[in-house]
Image: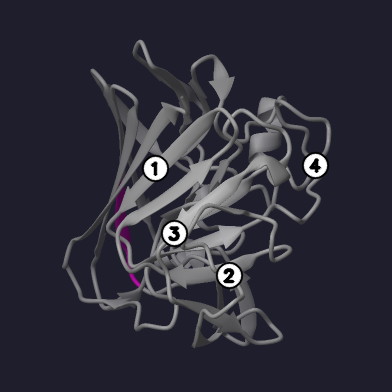
C-alpha cells in the first residue's frame, strides 16, 4: 500500500495504490472527504472509502451468492501499479477471472488529474471477452464538517431504483415527494438513503455551510449512501463511525444490461470541483 501526493495552490490530494483510491483531499486547509486517521484501517475488510469499486458495483447475484462491490477480491482490495506524471497519477491493474470469480480478463486504468480546484477521475476498462463490468469511485464527502446533517444536496432526477429484500436492483420508480432534491435539500430530510438516482443532466451539487462540491459526470446516474452503517473506523474531524458524510457514487444504470463487448474500451469521466461559499 503506497501513498502518492498531488498538490497545487488550491488542493492537496493523497492517493493510494490500494484500490486506486483517494486517501485524503484537502481544500482551503479542510478535509473534503472521509479519511481514516489510521492508515491501516484503509485496508480493513468492508471499508470502501473513496476506492475504485468493481468489477461490478453494488450488489449482484452470482452462483447463488450475493456479491457486494466485487466481493472479497474486488478491485478495492487490489494493489494497483502506478505512474506519476506532473499533475496526474495513472493506476493500472489486470483483473483475472480466477481471482475474482468473474469470467475473462479485464484491463483497468484509473487516472487522477489535479487542475486548479478540480480533481478529475478517468476510468478505462477493456474486457478480453463479453462480460459484466461497471466501475465507480466510492467517494464519501464531508466538505469540512463532521455532521452529515450539515450537508445539502441538489440533483436533477425524476426516477430512482427500488431494491428487493436482498438489496438487488428491482425496478425504477418515479420520484414524487420522496427523494426530491431538485433544490438544495438536507441530505437527511428523507432519512437514511441507499439508492441509485437516474440523472437528467450531468451535475450533482453538495454544500456545507462553507464549501460546495460540483460533480460533473458522464455516468447515467449516482448512488447515494448516507453512511448509516457503523464501521468501527475513526476518521478525521470526528470520533464517531457513522453519519459523518454522504457517499456519491457515479454509476451506470443498475437496471440496464451491464455486459461489455469483447475488446471494446469503455471510458468514464468525473470532475470534482471544490469552491468556497461566499
Q: Quadrant of residue 12?
A: top left
Q: Are marks 4 and 2 in contact (CB under 8 Å)?
A: no
Q: From where the camera sits, is residue 178 visible?
A: yes
**Distance CA(mark 3)–CA(mark 2):** 10 Å
Q: Nearer the viewer, residue 143 or 88?
A: 143
Q: Secondary structure at mark 1?
A: strand
Q: Are marks 1 and 3 in contact (CB under 8 Å)?
A: no
Q: Residue 136: image x %, image y %? A: 43, 56
Q: Mark 4: give few (<14), some (14-19) or many (20+) Cα within 10 Å.
A: some
Tag 4 residue: 241
Residue designated by label 2: 179
Disc sitting over residue 214 in the figure: 1
| Label 1 environment density (alpha carbons within 10 Å; few <14, some 14–19, many ≥20) | some
Q: Which residue is mark 3?
A: 155
Element under label 4? loop
SS of the residue under disc 3:
strand
Which badge, 2 or 1, is on the more N-terminal residue?
2
Q: Residue furthest top?
A: 9
Query: Which region is colored magenta?
Result: 104-109
Q: Which one is earlier in the sequence, the residue at label 1 or at label 3?
A: 3
Callout 3: 10 Å neighbours few (<14), some, many (20+)?
many
Mark 3 / mark 4, whichever is N-terminal: 3
Is the residue 114 above or below the residue 99 in the image?
Answer: above
Amino acid at each position: 500500500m503506497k501513498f502518492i501526493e498531488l498538490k497545487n495552490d488550491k488542493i492537496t490530494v493523497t492517493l493510494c495504490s490500494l484500490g486506486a483510491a483517494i486517501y485524503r483531499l484537502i481544500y482551503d486547509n479542510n478535509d473534503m472527504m472521509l479519511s481514516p486517521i489510521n492508515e491501516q484501517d484503509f485496508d480493513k475488510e468492508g471499508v470502501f472509502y473513496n476506492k475504485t469499486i468493481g468489477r461490478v458495483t453494488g450488489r449482484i447475484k452470482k452462483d447463488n451468492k450475493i456479491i457486494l462491490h466485487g466481493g472479497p477480491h474486488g478491485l478495492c482490495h487490489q494493489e494497483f501499479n502506478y505512474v506519476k506524471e506532473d499533475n496526474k497519477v495513472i493506476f493500472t491493474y489486470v483483473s483475472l477471472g480466477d481471482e475474482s470469480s468473474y469470467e475473462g480478463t479485464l484491463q483497468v486504468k484509473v487516472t487522477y488529474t489535479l487542475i486548479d480546484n478540480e480533481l478529475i477521475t478517468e476510468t478505462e476498462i477493456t474486457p478480453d471477452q463479453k462480460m459484466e463490468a461497471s466501475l465507480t469511485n466510492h467517494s464519501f464527502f464531508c466538505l469540512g464538517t463532521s455532521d452529515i446533517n450539515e450537508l445539502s444536496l441538489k440533483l436533477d432526477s425524476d426516477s430512482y431504483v427500488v431494491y428487493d429484500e436482498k438489496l438487488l436492483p428491482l425496478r425504477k420508480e418515479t420520484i414524487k415527494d420522496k427523494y426530491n432534491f431538485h433544490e438544495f435539500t438536507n441530505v437527511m430530510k428523507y432519512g437514511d438513503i441507499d439508492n441509485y438516482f437516474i440523472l437528467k443532466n450531468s451535475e450533482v451539487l453538495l454544500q456545507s455551510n462553507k464549501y460546495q462540491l460540483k460533480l460533473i459526470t458522464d455516468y447515467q446516474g449516482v448512488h447515494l449512501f448516507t453512511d448509516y452503517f457503523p464501521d468501527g473506523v475513526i476518521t478525521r474531524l470526528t470520533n464517531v463511525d457513522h453519519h459523518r458524510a454522504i457517499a456519491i457514487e457515479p454509476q451506470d444504470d443498475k437496471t440496464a444490461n451491464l455486459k461489455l463487448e469483447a475488446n471494446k474500451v469503455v471510458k468514464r469521466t468525473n470532475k470534482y470541483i471544490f469552491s468556497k461559499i461566499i
